[in-house]
């Protein structure tokens, strides 16, 4: 892979087609709202998956955020309101593994995300954004959040490949000990349309792969954190299930 530098002309194209470059724009000031932010890499590594509150925040830009080309600089910018970029900044304040955020200010049309913690976009890699399981028409600055929204930042293997579908695990938060419990796995496409997934594996418990309708059964002895995985798809949300 190359060193991640992209010419300004290419960066403009990627920003329009892939939402790699985060669109700037005014966002209404708002009180902090609770939302979930997930950070996942194309290798299947889950860096973060938690709910927290977010509102207007300040982000740092870095001269080291050179994945888009241009001339990024060290600075600060305010991101007003509850946004997909703002909640990522909030999460990085709480989780060491998300630091530093590498944000580029090389272009007038918005901030570009180059890296989260040790996971930096190099070569053809880029950070894709999903909002409530769908690809938004705006970037992180312009994607406003409401109560209980879900944000996914996904380090994609290549901008020349389609973004994989995102798995979603539906499971109860409390079950009886050793009682067979049915859970279900869906996949969301870029438009946010979901379908049941066959052959997904629910990790954290012994279970068969999901059937054609996305169902499988798990038996738990103690409090367990479950996650669904399937080859070629983005790992699901993590669900912590308590045992009565």
Image (cartoon, helix red, strand yellow):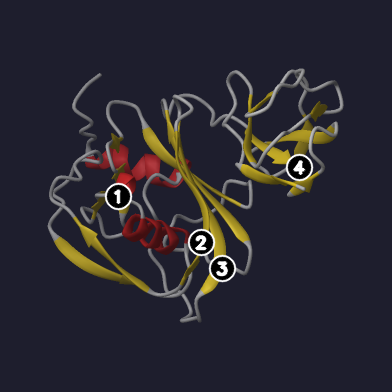
Q: Sequence order check: which comes first, mark 2 or mark 4? A: 2
Q: How far apart in space, not on screen, are marks 4 and 3 (Cα)?
A: 21 Å
The answer to whether residue 47 is left or right of residue 208 is: left
Q: Position of residue 34 (x, y in %)?
A: 56, 68
Task: For the residues labelled 3 and 2, say whether their Cβ atoms are less than 8 Å apart.
Answer: no
Identify the residue at horizontal 17%, vertical 45% (top origin): 70
Q: Is residue 92 visible?
A: yes
Callout in the foreground (2, 4)? 4
Q: Residue 143, which numbered label? A: 2
Q: Sequence order check: which comes first, mark 3 or mark 1? A: 3
Q: Sequence order check: which comes first, mark 4 or mark 3? A: 3
Callout in the foreground (3, 1)? 1
Q: How far apart in space, not on screen, are marks 3 and 1 (Cα)?
A: 21 Å
Task: For the residues labelled 4 and 3, say whether their Cβ atoms are less than 8 Å apart.
Answer: no
Where does label 3 land, which residue? 34
Where does label 1 land, which residue? 96
Q: Sequence order check: which comes first, mark 4 or mark 1? A: 1
Q: Residue 171, which numbered label? A: 4
Q: Position of residue 90 (x, y in %)?
A: 38, 62
């Amino acid at each position: 892979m190359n060193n991640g530098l992209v010419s300004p002309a290419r960066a403009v194209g990627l920003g329009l087609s892939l939402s790699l470059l985060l669109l700037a724009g005014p966002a209404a000031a708002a009180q902090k709202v609770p939302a979930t932010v997930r950070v996942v890499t194309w290798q299947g590594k889950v860096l973060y998956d938690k709910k927290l509150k977010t509102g207007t925040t300040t982000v740092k830009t870095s001269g080291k955020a050179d994945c888009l080309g241009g001339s990024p600089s060290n600075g600060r910018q305010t991101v007003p309101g509850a946004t997909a970029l703002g909640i990522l900044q909030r999460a990085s304040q709480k989780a060491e593994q998300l630091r530093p955020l590498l944000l580029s200010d090389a272009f007038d049309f918005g901030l570009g995300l180059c890296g989260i913690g040790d996971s930096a976009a190099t070569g053809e890699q880029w950070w894709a954004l999903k909002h409530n399981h769908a690809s938004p028409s705006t970037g992180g600055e312009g994607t406003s959040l409401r109560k209980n929204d879900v944000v996914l930042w996904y380090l994609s293997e290549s901008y020349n490949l389609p973004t994989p579908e995102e798995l979603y695990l539906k499971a109860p938060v409390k079950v009886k000990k050793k009682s067979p419990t049915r859970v279900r796995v869906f996949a969301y496409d870029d438009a946010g349309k979901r379908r049941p997934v066959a052959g997904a594996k629910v990790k954290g418990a012994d279970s068969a792969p999901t059937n054609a309708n996305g169902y499988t059964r798990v038996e738990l002895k103690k409090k367990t954190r479950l996650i669904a995985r399937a080859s070629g798809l983005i790992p699901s949300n993590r669900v912590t299930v308590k045992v009565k």
